[in-house]
Image: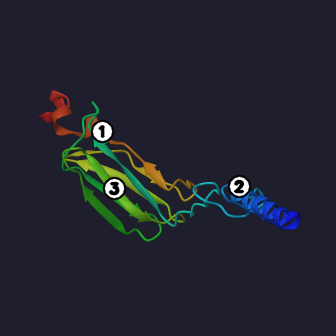
Amino acid sequence: MKSLLFVSFVMAAAASSLLGQAGQPDPHSNVFLGGDKPKKEKAPTSRSVRGTVTDDSGRPLENAVVTLTNQGTHERLSYFTKKDGLYYFDGLSFTTDYNLVAQYKDGKSIVKTLSQYDRSPRIVRILEIDKAARPDSRPAAANK
């Protein structure tokens, strides 16, 4: 009888030990749940440029033409801005230089270069139309 009681006690102790361990993670386990293991982000394969075309006071210009020129192939892409003055080009190569310029009526922004050495995947450029180039800003003597 004592041996049966002893066996029952040992089995109960083993069962409670197993149940107690089931809820606790094994510190030597290689299982990662949730966000425990950092994920590697994929390197971008292309870049984009976006921005706003403004006048000299900083107001966005609607219907300005933004031209992006590939310096190697001289291929040009153009974009007409909406009321917010925003433009956007995507799918640009990291290994190509680009020129970016905006035109509005008779005014023009300075040419900005997107260099192949700039490894930023998302580039922002504000293009300001030169006040001196707009017809309404010329001195009265120049309008004669």
Secondary structure beneath dot 1 equals loop
**Left or right, 67 with reference to 11:** left
**Residue 17 at x, y percent in the picture:** 76, 58
**Left or right, 12 with reference to 112:** right
Q: Do the residues labelled 3 and 1 touch (CB within 8 Å)?
A: no
Q: How far apart are marks 3 and 1 (CA)?
A: 21 Å
Between marks 3 and 1 in the image, the one whose residue lies nearer the viewer:
3
Q: Which residue, given by chain and number where applicable, does mark 2 sit on?
A: 20
Residue at the spot 50% in from the left edge and 56% down from the top edge = 121
Amino acid carrying label 1: it is Asp
Residue at the spot 63% in from the left edge and 54% down from the top edge = 36
Tag shown at residue 54 = none
Secondary structure beneath dot 2 equals helix
Secondary structure beneath dot 3 equals strand
Tag shown at residue 88 = 3
Relative depth, front residue between 132 and 117: 117
Q: Farthest right residue?
A: 3
Numbered circles on residues, count: 3
Between marks 2 and 3 in the image, the one whose residue lies nearer the viewer:
2
Amino acid carrying label 2: it is Gly
Relative depth, front residue between 117 and 136: 117
> Closer to the N terminus: mark 1 or mark 2?
2
Position of residue 73 relative to residue 21, above or below, is below
Between marks 1 and 2 in the image, the one whose residue lies nearer the viewer:
2
Looking at the rendering, in which quadrant would you find the C terminus? top left
> Closer to the N terminus: mark 3 or mark 1?
3
